[in-house]
Image (tube, rainbow, N blue to C red):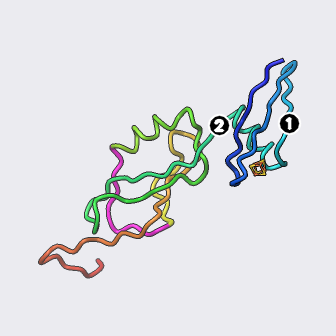
Amino acid sequence: MISSRVLCIVCPLGCQIEVKEKDGKLSFHGGCARGKSYAKQEVTYPCRMVTTTVSIRGGEIPRLPVRTSRPFPKDRILALMEFLRSFEVEAPVKRGEVLFRNLLGTGIDLIATRTIHRLEKEGEDSREA
Ligand code: SF4
């Protein structure tokens, strides 16, 4: 039998959940139902919400805050950050806008978490085409 502990981060109580594996079957001891579900995810397919910033061209500020639409597979977060390093969007962008679909083939999207207006340059025509 293999045994390990998972610290549940679903709520501030921070319970320790013991996970036992016997004959390929997992059992969970301690914590509530939500905690057990978290522990199962953590030992079988750990994921995290990713929040970061990406470059934005022509915006009021040079970086746009973004997040993933769902928790992202933990073992692929480095690859995601590498992808986002060269990712750039064009202002204007609205909060909640999907900037990229199906990141690295996961079915998870990239979402803007802030509205960024276009920075009007001197002499630039602000009328919509
Ligand atoms: S097991 Fe339940 S009560 Fe404990 S930290 Fe997780 S969600 Fe909170």
Instruction: Please state the horizontal and vertical placement of residue 56, each as a whole percent of the image.
Output: 31, 58
Does label 1 point to a residue whose CB lies under 8 Å from ligand 1?
A: no
In magenta segment, residue 89: yes
- The magenta segment is 86-95
Q: Residue at x 72, y 32 (%)?
A: 44
Q: Which residue is mark 1?
A: 29
What quarter of the picture does the N terminus occupy? Answer: top right
Q: Residue at x 13, y 76 (%)?
A: 122
Identify the element where label 1 is drawn: strand
Could you say which disc has been placed on residue 46 in the image?
2
Left or right, residue 38 beside residue 85: right
Left or right, residue 35 beside residue 113: right
Q: Distance from label 1 to label 2 (Cα)?
A: 19 Å
Badge 2 crowding class, 10 Å Cα cut-off, few under 14, some 14 to 19, many 20 or more, is some
Q: Residue at x 12, y 78 (%)?
A: 123
Q: Earlier in the sequence, mark 1 or mark 2?
A: 1
